[in-house]
Amino acid sequence: MLRYLCRGLDEVFLPVVLHQTEAGGKRIRPAFTLASCEAAGGREEDALVPAAMIELIHNYSLIMDDIIDKGMIRRGLPTVRAKYSEVMALLAGMFYREVLDEIAEDCPQPTKMRTLLIDTIKETIEGERLDILFEQAGRNEEYIVQNRFANVPLNLYLNMIGKKTAHLIQAACVAGGISANAKDSVVETLSKFGWSAGMAFQVIDDFLDVFGEKTGKEKGKDILEHKLGNAAIILSLEELSQEDKVRLMTVLRKERVTDTDAQQAFRLIAKTQTRARTQKLAFDFLKECKEALSELSESSGRTKLEALADFVVSRVY
Amino acid sequence: MLRYLCRGLDEVFLPVVLHQTEAGGKRIRPAFTLASCEAAGGREEDALVPAAMIELIHNYSLIMDDIIDKGMIRRGLPTVRAKYSEVMALLAGMFYREVLDEIAEDCPQPTKMRTLLIDTIKETIEGERLDILFEQAGRNEEYIVQNRFANVPLNLYLNMIGKKTAHLIQAACVAGGISANAKDSVVETLSKFGWSAGMAFQVIDDFLDVFGEKTGKEKGKDILEHKLGNAAIILSLEELSQEDKVRLMTVLRKERVTDTDAQQAFRLIAKTQTRARTQKLAFDFLKECKEALSELSESSGRTKLEALADFVVSRVY
């Protein structure tokens, strides 16, 4: 990946471009690609470039997300925008997108990979757009205020996280299948598996945001950022009395949400079965993705995919 | 172009995405593509999709530039960011980039077109990056302040506008040549022509910024935005006495440049031969691009290219 990113770059721009990839991260998405390739009967080495592509899509979206959310810290380090300025982060993000095309060209079946790439980024954009419009305050531009969602039923929430998160993990698995030159039915199975695993992933992320301790992330960040697009909040609103519902929404809609406000939100959520129901939602997706996997013949690749799915959800404990 | 942009878009996002293309503009870059195709012996219809690609690259860069420069008005209308918010503009820009890949796929010789696309956007990013670092104030992030250019010799300025502006017009002409399936030597000639025409284009833009009346643009915008990357300013600095040079740089380096400051800058520039020298610089590029054209056999396409180059520079009168 680095050789693609460094090519022909001015030395002053180089650290800006490298910052996001050097910051590390779990690298879970490329792991899905490598295991999927293996599970589809391919050699791991055929999926190395596609795995790099998947991780770079993720890094591209993180750079842009941090611009959108004015993120200061990610993975314990300053974000690209915080360290190098908003405009340089934007240029670095745009540069990543060009490198992605170059990487796709070097993948097995480049045309299929490029279609996957475009489709995935388009979905991510749409998911991010919905996530923004699910926010209840914090952005004052007329267009956003007018087009905000006043309420978000569970289905719409699932649609949003499908685009924002699950689609990329699905693409990670599909890229593995394409790398192995697998037949369509196998790619389709990997696709279903990846989508469900990705859904579980995001639900767990939402769970940790509200119930998590020691995740390294700020607890209640979604509440502080007025985000209605969180499984635990959506599920709570289903259960709460009309009065408490208004209280929770009032917190999300405050121009500045304080820690005290967030504590109130936690207390409201604690009145409900949300903790168990959010876990169940994630476990249902986990079950779904394992059922998809059972369509593949046994292999060390399949075992790895299962372990990855378990790992994703294990963060809940 | 519209059918690519509209495909599968949510109706709330649609106006955000369409705003930049519907705002119109001179559409001079696609005109270069169509005329180049004709001049290379191709049929205009073969260059329609490539011409759309070129115009969309331009629109993509405008959306992102307006985010970078916090632009409020373009082509007499609010910018995408001003009308729909910064974050929606960013998502729209990212969406344009995906559409660009789809358009490239539908061009004649898609692999060549895609290489041209990637190369052009990378150059534009680098040009924009240099243009930002040529600014003398207005951005306070540590990284930018530390890496700003304290002075910009003419060569470095030419390098910057080559990337920021000329490269896309060069690409417009090359795309026309590729559309016509022209032999390498013809594409090379179109490439030289386009580069010189593009250089003339930017020098004239800079000229109009400082000397222009009735261009519809704010006069002295570059000075108000602390931009050292303007031909007229670079050439003035070459001529001015040490004392006046310091005065001019002091204006550019003021945290807030007022209209009175800009007037002072204009008076300093008026002490020099800059007006004539900037025109000469543009005319030299015009001459260069016409010399390149003479390598092509006579055709109505060649005549159109000549007229386009003349038009670009005629804005000076």
Image (cartoon, coloured by chain):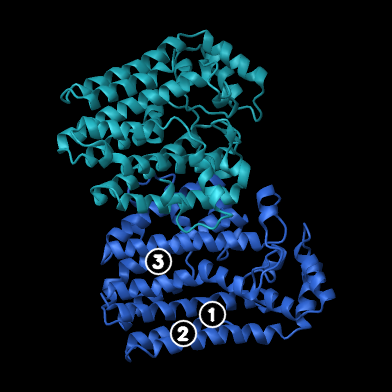
Chain colours: A blue, B cyan
Quarter of the image with the N terminus of chain A is bottom left
From the viewer's perspective, tell me whether residue A247 is left or right of residue B315. Answer: right
Left or right, A261 with reference to B87: right
Looking at the image, is mark 3 or mark 1 earlier in the sequence? 3
Asked if A146 appears above or below B294 in the picture, the reply is: below
Q: Which mark is drawn over residue A14?
A: none
Residue A54 got which mark?
3
Q: Position of residue A226 (x, y in %)?
A: 71, 63
Residue B1, horizontal then vertical, whole percent? 40, 45
Disc 2 crowd, CA 10 A, few/some/many (<14, 14-19, 20+)? many
Q: Amino acid at mark 3?
A: Ile
CA distance for labels 1 and 2:
9 Å
Q: Which residue is mark 2?
A: A289
Task: Name the subunit of mark 1.
Answer: A
Question: What amino acid is labelled 2 in the image?
Answer: Cys
Same-chain check, marks 1 and 2:
yes
Comparing A161 with B44, the one in front is B44
Mark linked to residue A200 = 1
Q: CA distance from mark 3 to mark 2?
A: 20 Å
Q: Amino acid at mark 1?
A: Ala
Taking the view exactly as shown, the residue that stands out farthest to the right is: A243
Asked if the residues shown at circle 1 and circle 2 are in contact, with their CB atoms under 8 angstroms apart, the answer is yes
Per the image, label 3 sits on a secondary structure element best described as helix
Q: Is residue B50 above or below residue B295?
A: below
